[in-house]
Image (spheres, grey):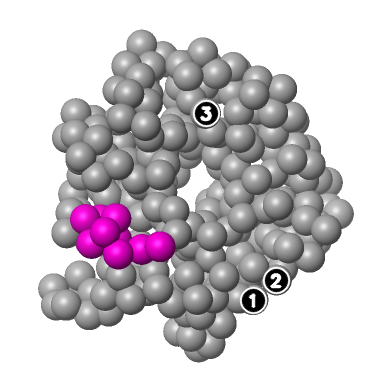
Amino acid sequence: MIELGVNIDHVATLRQARRTYEPDPVWAAVEAHLGGADGITVHLREDRRHIQDEDVRRLRELVHIKLNLEMAATPEMVAIARALKPEMAMLVPEGRHEITTEGGLDVVGQEAKLGAVVAALAGDGIVTSVFIDAEVAQVEAAARIGARVCEVHTGPYAHAFHAKGRDPESAAVVAELEKIRAAGAAIRAAGMRFNAGHALNYFNVQPVAALPGIRELHIGHAIIARSVFAGLREAVRQMKVLIREAAR
């Protein structure tokens, strides 16, 4: 059954704008759980622009659903993950000047380094995911380094969807969706779990959720944005309904 992981980074973004103590990401995680989230995702960035170390520690201690820690493949982040032991660690590229993650991880070009990171995390019982573009070569490299999960970057699909009049049958949208489908098939054939995420929202999520074999979607900004008007619990509930309808 398809699951929903809710990224709560931007709750921390709002808090850090005032360098205060609210809104609390742990409260957000509880509200997301009550709305039907199957997991919580946070990205502990090297510059600590939103989520802080203490947030991750408290989430690990207090959240009752699985925790997915997005992280760069650096010694500092590996040490933090090994100490906290989230259910899943997702390796992502990270740039100091980017607003959000701009593309998939180049597993092909960093196999030795990433293989060592995956082995270290696996040694502590942590499932490792890699965030990759929808390219079969990246899928094959992910399998070689021992990743157990591939999360396919859905940003190009989402941008095509927005640019082409929100028409899921436009040629550009169909082409991007086919890339995701093909990558998902390769991921499953290699014995890994097929997840997807990035820039998914209430209008573009269903074609992705309907893809064969997809296990989990990670969605953050759209849910946090809607929560401003509807409340976080209701925003999560609405997204969960959409993805479950599409999966059926």
**Gap in Å between the C-alphas at discs 3 and 2?**
27 Å
The residue depicted at 48 percent of the width and 85 percent of the height is 231
Rendered location of residue 25, percent (x, y)? 30, 70
Residue 60 left/right relative to 148: left
- Magenta-highlighted residues: 55-64
Residue type pointed to by label 2: Val
**Residue 226 visible from this viewpoint:** no
Q: Residue at x 53, y 87 (%)?
A: 230
Q: Residues within 10 Å of mark 2 (few under 14, many from 20)?
A: few
Q: Is residue 46 above or below residue 224?
A: above
Query: Which numbered disc covers residue 238?
Result: 1
Quarter of the view holding residue 22: bottom left
Predominant secondary structure in magenta?
helix
Q: Is residue 172 above or below residue 129?
A: below
Q: Which of the 4 quarters of the picture holds residue 114?
A: top left
Q: Is residue 129 above or below residue 110?
A: below
In the picture, the quarter occupied by the C terminus is bottom right
- The spot of residue 75 in percent (x, y) is 19, 28
Residue depth check, mark 3 versus mark 1: number of the one nearer the observer: 3
Q: Which mark is residue 148?
A: 3
Label 1 packing within 10 angstroms: few (<14), some (14-19), many (20+): some
Q: Is residue 118 magenta?
A: no
Q: Earlier in the sequence, mark 3 or mark 1?
A: 3
Q: CA distance from mark 1 to mark 2?
A: 5 Å
User: Which dot marks residue 241?
Assistant: 2
